Structures are given as C-alpha cells and as structure tokens.
Amino acid sequence: MKKEPEKHVFKKLRLTGNFREIAVQIGETEIRVAVIDGLTGLGKLKASLAAGNKYDLIEVNTCPGGCVHGAGLSFNASKDEIKNRSKIVYNADDTEAVSLSCKSLSCINLYEKLLKENSEIADKKIFYTHFEKRNVLL
C-alpha cells in the first residue's frame, strides 16, 4: 500500500537559515535531506558530513533564500521583502487543490498524450534519472 507524503514533515525545510536538514521515515527506510541556501551553507554541510552525518538528498540553492531571492529579482530587496515573497509561495503551495506534481491532471494528461503519440518512449525511461556523488565542491 502506497502512502502520500505528509506536507507538514517538509515544513522544517522552509525555515530560514543557510543550512537545514530533516529525516523522513518511509516504511522501514529513513531518508535524510539537507537544504542549503547560499553558498555560505556549504561550510555547515561540510562540518555536518565531517561529523559523520549522511544524506540521501542535498539541495543547494546558490541564491541566499533560494529562488525567491534569485537572479531576475530585485537584488536590493530587504529581508522583509524576501520573507514576504516566501510567504506568498508557501501560501500558494498550502492552498492549492493539487500540490504534488504527480497528482496534477495537466501533467498526467500531458504524459498520457506524449506516450500515446510517441511509442518509442512509451517505456517511460525518459522520466527517470539517476544521481551520483561528485566531490566537486567539498
């Protein structure tokens, strides 16, 4: 039996600070996630790894505060403006009828149409990828 992820578990990742981490229990498996906002968080990640912590997924946002303070947005935004942008994004996420892309009828319909019209990709391998550890930054 599959179980939907509970959104409140991930809310800790929305907090401020340049390094955040959570552990999520999925059945018998624990998934550990770290999020870095701004490259200054890399030092904290490096210290955490040196302390023996391991992560299954690490997201690195090079812009402090993530995309709400990224390229294309006002560089001189105050911290309050950035917090307000974040609140707007998170509020939309909390109030949308569909907040998981796998439940979006638009995405489901697109995939079904794409697969029906393109039999050479019908095995769905184009929708999967893999990740490998690279010691580029650390």
Image (spheres, rainbow, N blue to C red):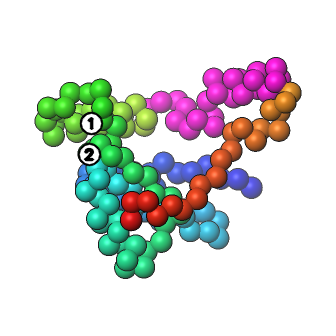
* Residue 47, quarter of the rendered image: bottom left
- The single residue placed furthest to the right in the displayed view is 119
Label 1 element class: helix
Is the residue marked by circle 2 packed among few (<14), some (14-19), or many (20+) residues within 10 Å? some
Q: Where is residue 103 in the image (x, y as percent from the top left)?
A: 63, 35
Specify whether 136 is left or right of 37.
Answer: right
Q: Earlier in the sequence, mark 1 or mark 2?
A: 2
**Residue corresponding to mark 2:** 64
The residue under label 1 is which amino acid type?
His
Front-most of 121 and 18? 121
Q: Residue at x 57, y 51 (%)?
A: 5
Residue 81: which numbered mark, if any? none
Q: Do the residues labelled 1 and 2 touch (CB within 8 Å)?
A: yes
Report x, y in % for residue 87. Answer: 29, 36
Q: Residue furthest bottom?
A: 51
- Report which quarter residue 64 is drawn in: top left
Comparing 131 with 6, the one in front is: 131
Crowdedness of circle 1 by 10 Å Cα count: few (<14), some, many (20+)?
many
Quadrant containing the N terminus in the rendered view: bottom right
Question: Is 116 on the left-hand or right-hand side of 48?
Answer: right
Give, as a three-letter code, the residue at label 2. Pro
The residue where tag 1 is placed is 69
Outermost residue toward the front?
Answer: 136
In the depicted structure, whether residue 26 falls above or below residue 118: below
Q: Is mark 2 on a helix, strand or loop?
A: loop
